[in-house]
């Protein structure tokens, strides 16, 4: 059964995880499956739009990503770098890289358990560290996180 074409409002809602990326939201992702089958766009067009806004993009296929279909990550390199540097002690203690590009590649590749050291330290008002929030985004623990790899 073919899926009907998404409306512009539906596309905006689906892409919000990526379109809100900027200085106050350093990273976002969507599974490739969601981009192709629900937003009915190509990952290349979504990445090109983000690049035109001055953002970095990284596409990870299913063989190297903890998301079953693979995922497209969009990130504000400077904001992510600032966050990683501000939490350098916790990042280093967690065994994660401080470099934004390598950090995104790592959180895309590995499904971090909630008892991983990166989930501890620097608690925000929501009860999760900013680092834990970033890892949750990579793990698909949000409404758009289809297809966790076991």
Image: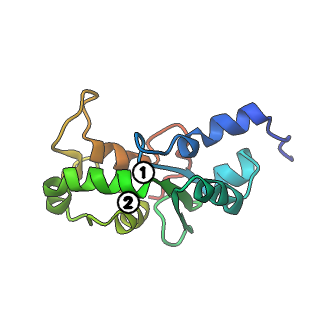
Q: Which numbered disc flags the more N-terminal residue, 1 or 2?
A: 2
Location of residue 88 in the rendering, given as x and y in whole percent from the top left corner: 18, 57
Residue drawn at x 56%, y 62% as measured from the top left: 70
Residue drawn at x 84%, y 41% as measured from the top left: 5
Q: Are marks 1 and 2 in contact (CB under 8 Å)?
A: yes
Q: How many labels does the image show?
A: 2
Nearest to the eye among marks 1 and 2: give it: 2
- In this rendering, does residue 93 appear at all? yes
Residue furthest to the top:
125
Which residue is the site of mark 2? 107
Q: In this view of the protein, which residue sits in the foreground, 69 or 90?
A: 90
SS under mark 2: helix
Cα separation, mark 1 vs mark 2, equals 8 Å
The image shows residue 81, relative to residue 102, as above or below, that is: above
* Left or right, 13 with reference to 26: right
Residue drawn at x 46%, y 54% as measured from the top left: 75
- In this rendering, does residue 116 appear at all? no
User: How busy is the neighbourhood of tag 1: few (under 14 within 10 Å), some, or many (20 plus)?
Assistant: many
């Amino acid at each position: 059964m073919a899926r009907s074409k998404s409306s512009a409002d539906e596309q905006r809602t689906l892409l919000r995880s990526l379109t809100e990326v900027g200085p106050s939201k350093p990273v976002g992702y969507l599974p490739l499956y969601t981009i192709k089958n629900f937003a009915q766009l190509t990952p290349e067009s979504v990445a090109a739009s983000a690049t035109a806004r001055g953002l970095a993009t990284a596409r990870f296929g299913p063989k190297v990503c903890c998301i079953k279909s693979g995922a497209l990550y969009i990130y504000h390199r400077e904001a992510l770098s600032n966050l990683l540097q501000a939490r350098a002690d916790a990042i280093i203690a967690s065994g994660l890289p401080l470099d934004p590009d390598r950090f995104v590649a790592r959180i895309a590749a590995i499904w971090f358990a909630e008892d991983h050291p990166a989930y501890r330290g620097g608690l925000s008002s929501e009860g999760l560290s900013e680092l834990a929030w970033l890892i949750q985004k990579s793990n698909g623990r949000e409404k758009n996180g289809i297809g966790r790899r076991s």
